[in-house]
Image (tube, rainbow, N blue to C red):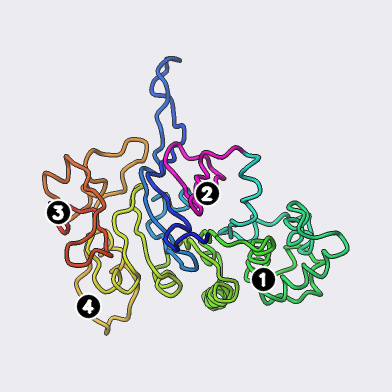
Amino acid sequence: MTPPPTDFLRVQGLKTYYPGPARSALPWGGHLQVKAVDGVDFTIPRGTTLGLVGESGSGKSTVGRSVLQLVKPTSGQVLFEGQDLCTLPARQLRPLRQRMQIIFQDPYASLDPRQTVGFTVGEPLLIHKLATKSELAARVAALCEMVGLNPDLTNRYPHEFSGGQRQRVGIARALATSPELIIADEPISALDVSIQAQVLNLLRELQTRLHLTYLFISHDLRAVRYVSDAVAVMYLGKIVETAPTPMIFANPQHPYTQALLQSVPRPRWAGGAAPIELKGEIPSPLNPPPGCAFASRCPLVTERCRRETPPLIPMRAQPEQQVACFVTNPPD
């Protein structure tokens, strides 16, 4: 029986903490914890794209790696077609890995400089026993053609390619196992602007052709708007707002989302609302403040914001939009 679309990927209460520095010089004092992801919930229907945005250090990449179990979450659930990946032992998780892949941010650092492009793209096929050695060359050539690379170049090494070509190699490697879910972790941030557009168009074309589902992680709001069906905004390890893409760009409700959108460069003649000025720095995930994590920088802050953590709940007027803010979306 085919599961309903909303059950393709569901993340509930996801927390990922890293060990931090010692609390004191005494050996029994224990260690602080870096709360990189601190209770995240979202759902991605099959065949759609969720854009995950936020400042550097907000926990976006850790969410992606936690979904794939490359980083073991501290607690929570990652339900992939109803199966909780967090509870699976390595032996049961391994067959599922070919259905979930990742495109890394740095197309050079993610490729082994001692391996040819052909070996890099073909290695997943051998690991998962999806092709014999006699079939490998043809499969690699087909994958290279799919992402716009010349198959005749597969005997070359990564340093012989441009940045855009190397990212296409990374995409071809991610597609080798015929995945259904791809985590695209800042896939265009290291590329020139013209190449960024080509890669974004390629990702959209591949999604349509192969029926892929994306978690698209980026700080580039224009790219997120172009490729995403819905957007989730992260701040200090938490999601503060989520909504369908047109809704969140037309009518952002959380003050942090409003500040992010107003930070996008635009021509001076375009006008628009006066930008929200955010003062201060992002609090440390080693010692997050009580209450709303954004309270120390928010222009709308109240005393309740400093004491209590606002829940991420639907807006009364438009339930598709969920906002964690006592001011713009107060609970009943």
Q: Does residue 255 sit above or below 148 in this rendering?
A: above
Which residue was labeled with disc 2?
65
Q: Residue at x 50, y 68 (%)?
A: 47
What's the amino acid at mark 3? Pro
Secondary structure at badge 3 equals: loop
Q: Is residue 245 left or right of residue 134?
A: left
Label 3 CA crowd tier, 10 Å (few <14, some 14–19, many 20+): some
Looking at the image, do the residues carrying marks 2 and 1 touch, with CB atoms under 8 Å apart? no
Q: Along the polypeptide, which appears first: circle 4 or circle 3?
A: 4
Q: Along the polypeptide, which appears first: circle 3 or circle 2?
A: 2
The residues tagged by marks 1 and 3 sit, at their Cα atoms, a distance apart of 48 Å
What's the amino acid at mark 2? Arg
Q: Along the polypeptide, which appears first: circle 2 or circle 4?
A: 2
Label 1 or label 3, whichever lies nearer to me, is: 3
Residue 117 x/y as whole percent: 76, 63
Q: Which mark is residue 165?
A: 1
What's the amino acid at mark 4? Gly
